[in-house]
Image (cartoon, rainbow, N blue to C red):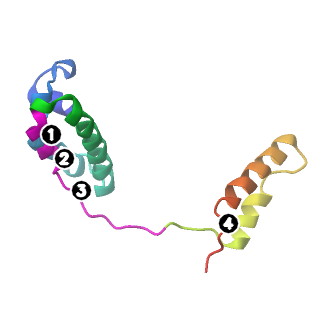
């Protein structure tokens, strides 16, 4: 919709030639400045766009230079957060939450046990 609005055409009338690095960069700025999205959201959108353009590399060799310019758009640096983990007592509280007296509770507890066993390394 952003490209269609900027180029004053219907979305179905957009062509590959119209979607260039300048337009993509403007879209990414629009996300942050006007829509107030975080840099992480901008990077997710850019990753999707780059994925599409990597697909096009093999389908549209005539547009290879345009595609390379889009693929050269850098991701913004963001703060990386550590993956949080549950303490043993917190994990036990989650496992104890389903009611073992009901069939659904037994099922839910079993699924939680399997899920927690996948990350069974205890924190240091």
- The answer to whether residue 113 is above or below residue 124 is above
Which of the two discs, 4 and 3, sits closer to the camera?
Answer: 4
**How far is the residue under mark 3 from the one under mark 2?**
10 Å
Place of residue 19 in the rendered image (x, y in percent of width and height, measured from the top left): 14, 34
The part of the image, by quadrant, that contains residue 81 is: bottom left
Label 3 – label 1 distance at C-alpha: 16 Å
Q: Is residue 115 left or right of residue 17?
A: right
Q: Are marks 1 and 4 in contact (CB under 8 Å)?
A: no
In primary-sequence order, the first of circles 3 and 1 is 1
The span from disc 1 to disc 4 (Cα, nearest Å) is 44 Å
Q: Nearer the viewer, residue 50 or 18?
A: 50
Q: Is residue 26 visible?
A: no
Q: Position of residue 8 (x, y in %)?
A: 10, 24
User: Distance of mark 4 from mark 2, alpha carbons?
Assistant: 39 Å
Disc with the residue nearer the chain's start (4 vs 3) = 3
Q: Residues within 10 Å of mark 4 (few under 14, many from 20)?
A: few
Residue 68 lies in the magenta stretch = yes
Which residue is under mark 3? 75
Q: Which mark is residue 71?
A: 2
Is mark 3 in CB contact (under 8 Å) with mark 1? no
For the C terminus, which image quadrant?
A: bottom right
Find out whether residue 117 is within the magenta segment.
no
Q: Earlier in the sequence, mark 4 or mark 2?
A: 2
Q: Which disc number belongs to residue 120?
A: 4
What residue is at 68 percent from the left and 54 percent from the top? Answer: 115
Identified at 8% across, 40% down, the residue is 65
Circle 1 is placed at which residue position? 67
SS for callout 4: loop
Tell me the SS state at disc 1: helix
């Amino acid at each position: 919709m952003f490209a269609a609005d900027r180029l004053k055409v219907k979305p179905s009338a957009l062509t590959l030639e119209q979607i260039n690095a300048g337009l993509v960069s403007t879209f990414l700025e629009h996300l942050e400045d006007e829509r107030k999205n975080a840099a992480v959201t901008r990077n997710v959108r850019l990753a999707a766009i780059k994925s599409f353009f990597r697909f096009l590399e093999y389908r549209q060799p005539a547009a290879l230079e345009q595609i390379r310019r889009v693929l050269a758009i850098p991701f913004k640096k963001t703060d990386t957060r550590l993956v949080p983990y549950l303490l043993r007592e917190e994990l036990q509280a989650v496992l104890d939450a389903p009611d073992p007296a009901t069939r659904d509770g037994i099922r839910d507890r079993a699924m939680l046990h399997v899920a927690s066993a996948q990350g069974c390394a205890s924190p240091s």
